[in-house]
Image (tube, helix red, strand yellow):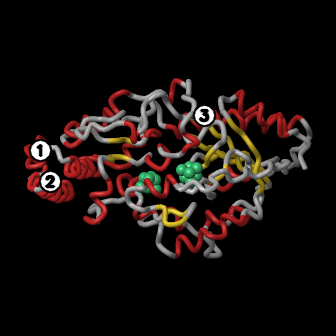
């Protein structure tokens, strides 16, 4: 066991700008055992990267000990990205859409978190070297990841005592809530692990009840194919018509199951400059998004996770949101979109026009 006290590692993380840090072991994380069943049931939808397997045919994300046999510990760091803006459940303007809170920031969070993680990693490396824990010839190994590692970060976050995994599948910290970006450092250093965070959901079921598409199929289990985040970001092409009404006015991601969580009621706002919102992305006008040009999309979402949805996906989502809005002033823009050269946008606009007609007839 590397004789560096965990408090020293946590101090390094704080100095690098993280709010929380803990150490997880590599083995015996029982939450990983259900991952293969979840994949086999197809609940990951079209997210093929989740199916990545090692040479033995095992799912990489469930087998860190095989994928990185040199790893002895996982240092998990977390940073609060909450801002002082209202929650989606507190805004009601039907002419405006909703972009998930994590995507408002001025810099892509992957870069912001990785920069801080790099500082922790290099300090750890220095310490390992200076204390003679660097066996020749190769020295100790470190690998830092933000979302891209062969592991399910939230499981390791629980074992590192960052927070428990809520029924909404998010990591929740008792003091900070669940608006947390996670970064992990795999290391060959054998560090003393933290005690796993205890579950504090209790009898609460607010997130399950509030989910508009019933995507939380069991406490802590998500069917991504039903989740608005998946539908608006990852799903390409047609969105199944039976799911469109439940998407409400979400155009990129969904925060509802976090907005309703009691642990987020008093979640503090981050003071980090990179996580302050771009005002245009908070509750944006649907018409603006629906008629965005490629140049405007590139310019507006430079360095933003929203680029993942691509322009076609964002306009498709805006068309659905207009159809769900009940706002008849969207008819002209939807008629233009119904003749769009992008067949996906055009089909969803036709669906939206039909919804508005039904809405008018029933009012
Ligand atoms: S993100 Fe939205 S759709 Fe997905 S589980 Fe949470 S409330 Fe449901
Ligand atoms: S809303 Fe309730 S059940 Fe859901 S994650 Fe928060 S505390 Fe847990």
Q: Residue at x 77, y 35 (%)?
A: 10
Taking the spot 72% from the left edge, 39% from the top edge, the residue there is: 21
Sequence-first tag of 2 and 3 = 3
**Relative to residue 194, is residue 83 drawn left or right?**
left
Q: Quadrant of ligand 1?
A: bottom left
Calculate the distance from the C-alpha at mark 1 to the C-alpha at mark 3: 46 Å
Q: Is residue 130 visible?
A: yes
Residue 196 is situated, as x and y percent measured from the top left of the image, at 75, 52
Badge 2 crowding class, 10 Å Cα cut-off, few under 14, some 14 to 19, many 20 or more, is some
The residue shown at (27%, 37%) is 93
Location of residue 238 by image quarter: bottom left
- As rendered, which of 108 and 196 lies closer to the eye? 196
Residue with the mark numbered 1? 328
Instruction: Report which quarter residue 271 is drawn in.
Output: top right
Q: Secondary structure at mark 3?
A: helix
Between disc 1 and disc 3, the foreground one is 1
Q: Which mark is residue 65?
A: none
Q: Is residue 345 above or below residue 302?
A: below
Residues at marks 2 and 1 touching, judged by CB atoms closer than 8 Å: yes
Nearer to the camera, 339 or 139: 339
Q: Read off the residue under disc 2.
A: 359
Instruction: Indicate whether 14 appears above or below 156.
Output: above
The residue lying at 45 percent from left, 32 percent from top is 105
> Which mark is drawn over residue 115?
3
Q: Real-space Cα distance between discs 2 and 3?
A: 49 Å
The image shows residue 303, relative to residue 223, as above or below, that is: above
């Amino acid at each position: 066991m590397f004789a560096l006290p965990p408090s020293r590692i946590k101090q390094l993380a704080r100095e690098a700008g993280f709010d929380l840090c803990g150490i997880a072991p590599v083995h015996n994380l029982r939450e990983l055992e259900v991952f293969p069943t979840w994949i086999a049931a197809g609940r990951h939808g079209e997210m093929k990267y989740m199916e990545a397997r090692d040479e033995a045919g095992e799912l990489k994300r469930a087998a860190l000990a095989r994928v990185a046999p040199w790893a002895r510990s996982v240092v998990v760091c977390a940073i609060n990205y909450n801002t002082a803006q209202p929650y989606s459940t507190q805004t009601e303007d039907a002419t405006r859409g909703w972009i998930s809170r994590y995507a408002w920031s001025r810099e892509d969070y992957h870069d912001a978190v990785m920069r801080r993680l790099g500082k922790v990693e290099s300090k750890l490396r220095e310490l390992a070297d200076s204390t003679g824990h660097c066996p020749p010839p190769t020295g100790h190994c470190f690998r830092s990841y933000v979302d891209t590692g062969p592991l399910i970060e939230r499981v390791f976050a629980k074992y590192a005592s960052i927070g428990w995994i809520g029924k909404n599948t998010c990591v929740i910290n008792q003091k900070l809530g669940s608006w947390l970006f996670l970064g992990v450092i795999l290391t060959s250093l054998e560090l003393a692990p933290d005690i796993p965070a205890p579950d504090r959901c209790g009898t609460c079921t607010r997130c399950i009840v509030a989910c508009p598409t019933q995507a939380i199929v069991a406490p802590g289990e998500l069917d991504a194919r039903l989740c608005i985040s998946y539908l608006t970001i990852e799903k390409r092409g047609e969105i199944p018509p039976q799911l469109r009404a439940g998407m409400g006015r979400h155009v990129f991601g969904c925060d509802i199951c976090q907005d309703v969580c009691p642990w987020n009621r008093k979640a503090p706002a981050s003071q980090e400059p990179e996580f302050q919102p771009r005002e245009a992305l908070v509750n944006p006008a649907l018409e603006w998004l629906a008629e965005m040009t490629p140049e405007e999309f590139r310019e507006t979402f430079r360095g933003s996770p929203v680029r993942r949805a691509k322009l076609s996906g964002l306009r498709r989502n805006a068309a659905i949101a207009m159809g769900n809005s009940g706002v008849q002033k969207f008819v002209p823009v939807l008629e233009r979109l119904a003749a769009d050269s992008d067949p996906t946008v055009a089909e969803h606009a036709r669906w939206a026009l039909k919804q508005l007609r039904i809405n008018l007839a029933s009012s």
